[in-house]
Amino acid sequence: MPALRSPEPVPGSRSEAEEPPRRLLELQLSRGSAPAPPRPGFLRSLCCRFSDVSSQGDGQNLVTEDVTVVEGDVATISCRVKNSDDSVIQLLNPNRQTIYFRDFRPLKDSRFQLVNFSNSELRVSLTNVSISDEGRYFCQLYTDPPQEIYTTITVLVPPRNLVIDIEKETAVEGEEIELNCTAMASRPATTIRWFKGNKELTGKSEVERWSDMYTVTSQLLLKVGREDDGVPVICLVDHPAVKDLQTQRYLEVMYKPQVRVSQNYPLQGLTREGEPLELTCTAFGKPQPTDMRWLRVDDEMPQHVVVSGSNLLISNLNKTDNGTYRCEASNAVGKSHADYMLFVYDPPTTIPPPTTTTTTTTTIPTTITDSRAGEEGAIRSVDHAVVGGVVAVVVFAMLCLLIILGRYFARHKGTYFTHEAKGADDAADADTAIINAEGGQNNSEEKKEYFI
């Protein structure tokens, strides 16, 4: 242990009556023994001095910071001196028991350990912090007058348990169920948030205090549907002592069947007399439907109709089969159905029927599939073909007429030019050609006069 040096008394700063107790403490510390209790008068004087200094806000040399620590972790307390004059630094607990006097620990609590000691700093660590360690810790500096400041240790306690209680393990679609999430024994009180999948929901929280701990319970009312089956409901905790603390429960929702009727044959086109028809009924629900049946609405099922499980088959359609055919499915929750409307057309003629697609849309409400889909489109297709043929014939006739007229006018114009230039073919030059042409015209006139 380094030798302790007692500063010389400064005239006017300390009285000689105050100096011996401090030198006695340093002497006992240098010998490795605990300091003897100071005289009562000295303690009263020292406490008064510290009380006076605590009320002074300016000019203090001591510096420290508040500490926030999670229960069970390590807290570090630091007492620092701005302008050190080799004065003694001391650290006291909330009960004003000395933890460290310079680098000596009188308090028999091994959780306190010296981290650093110098003329300008006393730094102490406290391991395995508990709620009982929370409070004010005092840093004291033996100056004239003595100085004192305090630091506050705040202990955080994360929730010890997080539980979701659900009113019903299995719910029916349309019901409103209650869920409760409880975060027990935390400090400070936690904030609970609810999520259904990625969507945040709003709950109602209640806080109960037990001694220094808080228990928070949040209630969530949730109306469930079939789309909520298998979706997780998450209870998440916001607390400064813990991150990403959450628990979840998966919803189990029962719902009545969803029914759909599909046409297997004919795959495309109209349902015509003499042809077969095959329908299939599919149903999904929770629990899975156990009862499925076919019936004809407002009439009896024809005798030649064959029903095999979820399939309905008519091998030879006729006009008496027209009507609405219904598939019903049920489970423990309820019953649903889907309808198929059949209309039988005449057998195909010379014009092949256009291809059409028959679709069936089935939901919980009644759905109807009509076999007459595409009739209007077939008629429109035939009209377009006839109009196109007539237009093609008219265009072809007009082209032929134009070719004939062109050839006639070209031949007539060539003959006219040939008679006009008659008599000029044997001329030696242009002048002779003109004379011959004129002579030819004169001769012609003379011949005409001669015959007359």
Image (cartoon, helix red, strand yellow):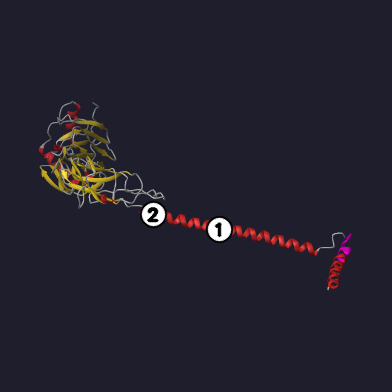
- Residue with the mark numbered 2: 377
Q: Quadrant of the C terminus?
A: bottom right
Q: Give the x, y percent position of residue 294.
A: 21, 45
Residue 445 highlighted magenta (yes or no): no
Note whether residue 7 is visible.
no
Judge whether 295 appears above or below 384 on screen. above
Residue span colored magenta? 427-434
* Residue 432 occupies quadrant: bottom right
Q: Quadrant of the N terminus?
A: top left
* Label of residue 163 in the image: none
* Label of residue 395 in the image: 1
| Element marked by disc 1 | helix
The type of residue carrying mark 1 is Val
Mark positioned earlier in the residue sequence (1 or 2)? 2
Camera-side residue: 410 or 40? 410
* Residue 424 occupies quadrant: bottom right
The type of residue carrying mark 2 is Gly
